Amino acid sequence: MGSSEAQAMAAHGYRPAMVGGRYRVTGVLAEAEDGDVVTGVDVREDREVVLKRVRKPSRTQTTRIRTVHAILSGLKHRNVMRALDLKEGNADAWLVSGEVSGRDLLDWWSRLPLGVNASFDERWGYASPLVGGLLDGLGAMHRSQLAHLDLKPSNIRVDRLGIATVVDFGFGAGLGDEEPDADDEAGLDDWFGYQAPELLDGLSVSSAADQWSLGAVIYVLLTGKRPVPGRTLAELQSAYERGRVQPITDWRPDVPEEVATIVTRMLAWEPMDRFPSISDVRDAFGKLLHSPPKQPYQPWSAPHPTLVGREPFLTFFHRRMTELVRGGKGALVRLSAPAGAGKTRLLEAWASEARDNEEVDAFFASCRPGVARTALDGWFRPPAVDLEASPPKDLVEQAVAAIRRPTVLLLDHLEEVDAVTWARIHRVAAAAASGTSPLLVVLSGRALPDLEPRVTPESPRFFNVELPPLTPRAVEKLLRAASAEEDDLAVRDRAAEAFCDEADGLPANLVRVFLEDEEQGRVLREGRHWVVQVGAGIEEPPVRARPTMHEQFLAWVEELGGTVEVEALLCCLAMRRTAVVDGLRFAADSDEVSFRYVAGRWYVTVAEGVVSSAVEVYGKPEAHRRFARWLEAAGDAEGLAAERTGQHWHKGGDSAAAAGCFAAASAAEATIGNTSDARRLLMISRTLAARASGNRR
């Protein structure tokens, strides 16, 4: 744990900091009188975990916790969290599970490009794979004689592919969560409306309660309303006392009768009136459900492995940080390496260390594909400029002079930098290399422009850093043997050498090798590590049929800019997620697209000449509008990236929204002294605003 993180935990007052001598607590997700949910790190296995604490569990709760652990530790289902460990003390019990990636269900749902008036077909296109996955997960649990008993949106995590995972099982007195405080509106909103009536009445409960809760989740996704309405505790209790659910078609008349009938039966007040089992619910939906996508073996879907083989570089950066803080010595670091060498991962590790130091200001910026000036986001702050005049010649010098505290700048993907941005960065880099400014600047990219004449190789505070290829010894740290037997350990060591050779020592290639071998059964992924499988049958991978609408898929990507966020494609294209995933997999296997990880996002780029000019793209305006809404939800409607969002609003035919984005981009360009671009964008904004109001000038 870094120093600032440790101080934050101490200030929070959470105890204990270590659980069972193995799990270091790093954060608190939720606190309650009878228990908490915290994040942690397994110091033995070097992986992130989540721990659910139950304070002073009763005998019934202890039995429940042990049952959940026993079943979930052996139930390997992608829609159900996996229990890793159970720690029982004198007063508390801790259920340890692997961290589940993604967002809470309603948070994920709110980011989709769905308007208030979205049709049933639009909503069901996103909801159906979720429902199918949840039914599969709950069905697997119920067949093992385990019910969740606290199913609600905050206990469902959805990843970027739209794969839902149930987490955080109920352990309360009634085996659901304890009733929230009457004044806690957020807690009430999350709790009431998803709890089955028998849970609230304190009656005997069964897996039928999960069916009611899942029906409530489906109801909310399709209508935006809870089946049991109310804003206060009294209103909610009164609604439950009425003992019925308002028909779903009262809110959404376009819901097909077949779907409405299924949801209504799932929400029957009496458990005996519901479907006999979750399997029967799935059979009732039948072909109405779209299958969730299979987990693809592409790098954009894989969790980042542990950073290995780069320990000397962490030490190097720590020394530069110490010199900056204690001696006031600035420095310039140039990190240059080929694609896939792990530059971004190393910069992320450096940024984490810098942010943990409360004595410095840390900024990590990147040239996003097509938006090079985002490398100036946040840290370049010269004095305000007059749009009607040229910027002062000493603009950068004024910005540097305004820096008072030790500052760390980590700038990534500078191979795409433009001339204006590089001029700013170049002069700031020169100030850092002089050693007289409180600046530690790191420049990273596949190929960087020349730093001369302002910075020469002889500059005493200028450091060139090159990343060597990974070694088999480093790769071993990413692998686990199937057991502690000597034969299994030997297999792991030989596999490390083979993987390293096949990947040419490049971390990005190594991830691809792992994922492809996972597809063939040679390795099994566990968190950020892979377990080498002994004696696994290796078969030729099946030849994939060319997906339908393949050319349309690639043409859509090209239409949206050629280089597009993977998550945006999954959310914005007028295709089922399964079709998008199939398209990405087939295109990657055919070398028609490539993937890049930039500024916390995975991007896909279409290879040159792949898309035929004869392919006609249908639904262009709507695709651009969906993409613009996604960019706004991702925070790109402000700052230097707003121009890109405005372009998509413009192509989507929404002049008013485009005008707002161009105005925001103009203001952002003005803050970095780019007066000509600021004037250009402001003029575009005014023209579009006039067009939107019908007053052409």
Image (spheres, helix red, strand yellow):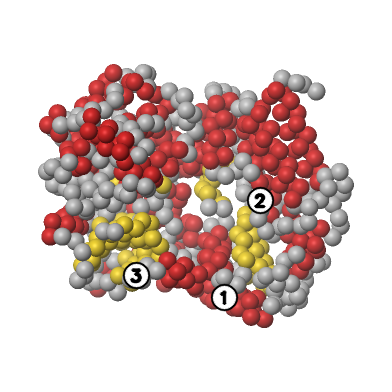
Q: Is residue 324 left or right of residue 532?
A: right
Q: Quadrant of the N terminus?
A: bottom left
Question: Marks 2 and 1: CB-CB under 8 Å?
Answer: no
First reached walking from the N terminus: tag 3 or tag 1: 3
- What amino acid type should be assigned to the residue bearing mark 1? His
The label nearer to you, 3 versus 1, is: 3
Q: Which residue is mark 3?
A: 15
- Mark with earlier residue (3, 2): 3
Mark 1: which secondary structure? helix
Q: Which mark is residue 318?
A: 1
Labels 2 and 1: the sequence-earlier one: 1
Distance in Å between CA atoms under marks 3 and 1: 29 Å
In the rendered image, residue 369, in percent from the top left (x then y), is placed at: 62, 46
Q: Quadrant of residue 19?
A: bottom left
- Write the residue at 40% across / 29% down: 123
Q: Residue 425: image x %, image y %?
A: 73, 59
Label 2: element kind? helix
Q: Nearer the viewer, residue 456 or 42?
A: 42
Q: Is residue 257 visible?
A: yes
Secondary element at tag 3:
loop
Task: Give the spatial CA distance, label 2 vs label 1.
Answer: 26 Å
Residue on which the image places disc 2: 374
